[in-house]
Image (cartoon, grey):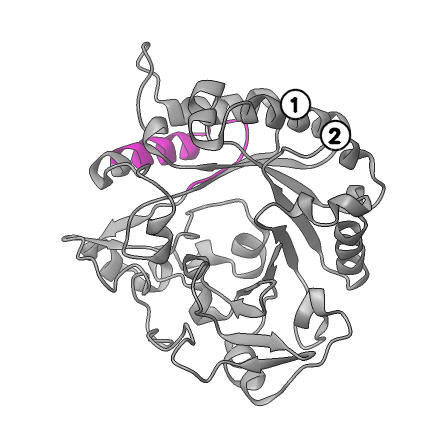
Amino acid sequence: MILDVNTVFISQILHSTLKKKKYHSKRPWLLFLISKRWVHLKLTIMGGEPTLYGLTQGYKPLLKVIDEAKSLEYEYVRLDTNGQFEPELLMKEGFRKLDEITFSLDGPTPEINDLIRGKGVFNKCVSNIKRAIKLDYNVDITCCIHRGLVKRDKDENLLLDSMIHFAEALGVNRINFHDLFKTGIPRDTWTGDLDPSLEKWIKVYEKIQSNIEKGKYKIPVRIPQCFITKKEFEENPEYYGYCPAKMGERVLVHPNGIIRICSLMIGTPYGVARFYEGKIVWDETPTNELRDHELNEHTPCTNQSKSIDFGKLVPLCVSFKPKQKEIVWREKLKWESKRR
């Protein structure tokens, strides 16, 4: 289980204060989340598959994490799941404390989704989505952008557009997309041959973003821009240079003790700190993920710019999703105010 923590604090606290001090915790599975130096905002419980945590113990360990997060006054506690859990979990009183459940679904039909996720996954996930909505959970869908969704069906409907309408019909609150582009990062080795061409994606993105701005969809759509021309970036680097690593805007807390910021470094030894023996210690070694970042400069995504030249294009942070309805982006960072 991984904890993704949006803590909204001054970057110096993460980059300097944490470097100098060791924080002790009697709750090692929450690591340094209890530090009162940071404003507790949003906690995401993800994985792997978090609903497997404590499965043989009636989910008690998972429910304890949720309960403790609430007792620590996190404003928003959410969980990412593949939706393959047993329906009884939705009936647990402690599970109902979640502010949001996000289900992973990669297509509007079993044929598209199960080709990626596995046979039978679509039907069980959709069944649990419907149950959760009926029980008044706040439900989102997260979906990977893959080749199967940038195609058109026999009626020339864009399948990514169909995916959004499918989410609407289910009655979810919001849909969030993630990219799978090969950009010379560790993730490239385990995401398979699923990423669309950049040329096709740019056209699809422009179409979907246009639909969003025209109010075509009934639910909020969070979709990453992924790439932009160098010229456009240079016209507004403060806006397009969004980077959680430089801002110290979030951390990912891993079971093996690694604390990192950039999700693109998952599966590597890179991070900003380590948790061990009841304390948190800043990473002073070459595996500190911030070493290659120009912390005081607005640049294209550092980790995606190291080994591939995209020509006239530059990569943007995978979390850069213009006009997205997301609590940190809109309410805390007020990032859209930087657009010009």
**Nearest to the observer: residue 213 or residue 266:** 266
Q: Is residue 256 left or right of residue 297?
A: right
Asked if residue 317 is positioned above or below residue 128 in the image, the reply reads: below
Q: Is residue 126 visible?
A: yes
Q: Quadrant of residue 269?
A: bottom left
Q: Quadrant of residue 289?
A: bottom left
Which residue is pictured at 62% across the width and 54% down the height?
A: 1
Q: Position of residue 274 (x, y in %)?
A: 56, 75
Q: Secondary structure at mark 2?
A: helix
User: Are the two marked residues, 2 and 1, in contact with CB atoms closer than 8 angstroms?
Assistant: yes
Q: Position of residue 17 (x, y in %)?
A: 57, 85
Q: Which amino acid type is shown beneath numbered disc 1?
A: Ser
10 Å crowding of disc 2: few (<14), some (14-19), many (20+): some
Which residue is pictured at 40% across the width and 52% down the height?
A: 318
In magenta segment, residue 220: yes
Q: Position of residue 170 (x, y in %)?
A: 60, 22
Residue extending farthest to the left is 311
Instruction: Find the distance from the CA under tag 2 to the CA under tag 1.
Output: 9 Å
Residue 325's mark? Answer: none
**Nearest to the observer: residue 176 or residue 259:** 259
The residue that mark 2 highlights is 87
The residue that mark 1 highlights is 127
10 Å crowding of disc 1: few (<14), some (14-19), many (20+): few
In magenta segment, residue 18: no
Q: Which amino acid type is shown beneath numbered disc 2?
A: Pro
Q: Position of residue 47 (x, y in %)?
A: 58, 50
Over which residues does the magenta segment extend?
Answer: 203-223
Asked if residue 77 is positioned above or below residue 252 in the image, the reply reads: above
Image quadrant containing the C terminus: bottom left
Q: Is residue 279 left or right of residue 329?
A: right
Q: Is residue 63 left or right of residue 259?
A: right
